[in-house]
Amino acid sequence: MIVGKRAADGTLAPDAAALLRAAERHASPGAALILLDSPERKSWFSKRLPFLASMDQIGGKAAAYVCVNRACKLPVTSPGELEALLTAPASRAGTTSRPSTR
């Protein structure tokens, strides 16, 4: 999941766009990619997947959260860090999922 903002002109902010490009290049087949780029979108998704409500930007920068087998790793803010997470053997084995509600 990418949490970022849009610029005044409506385009995705550069830091969020860079994370999105990295995610699109390196995500496992079948992985879910969620972009939370506005309060309205975050609200909509959080009502359906409540664990998303706690995921925010980090220090004013767009952040990426990688979740595998019902567990999320710590967020990262650079495309390089995201690429490393997505290409690590453990990340390639699973798909993005929400935490267990059991």
Image (cartoon, rainbow, N blue to C red):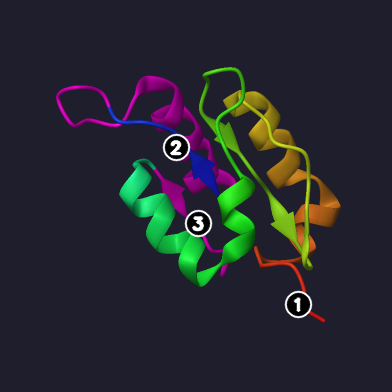
**Which residue is identified by label 1?**
101
Q: Kindly indicate the quadrant of the structure image that contains residue 43.
A: bottom left
Q: Nearer the viewer, mark 2 or mark 3?
A: 3
Give the magenta part as a residue range: 7-36
Does 67 appear above or below 74? below
Taking the magenta stretch, the answer to whether it contains residue 34 is yes
Which residue shows up at 35% across the image and 53% down it? 41
Q: Is residue 86 left or right of residue 2?
A: right
Pinpoint residue 52: horizontal percent, then vertical percent: 58, 55
Q: Secondary structure at mark 3?
A: loop
Above or below for 1 versus 96: above
**Residue annotated with mark 2:** 21
The residue type indicated by label 1 comes to Thr
Element assignment for label 2: helix
Q: Work out which residue is located at the far left of the displayed protein and give it.
A: 9
Mark 3, Cα crowd under 10 Å, few <14 / some 14-19 / many 20+, is some
Q: Secondary structure at mark 1?
A: loop
Residue type at the position of mark 2: Arg
**Marks 1 and 2: which is nearer the front?**
1
In the image, what residue occupies the spot 49% across and 71% down?
Answer: 48
According to the picture, the residue beneath numbered tag 3 turns out to be 33
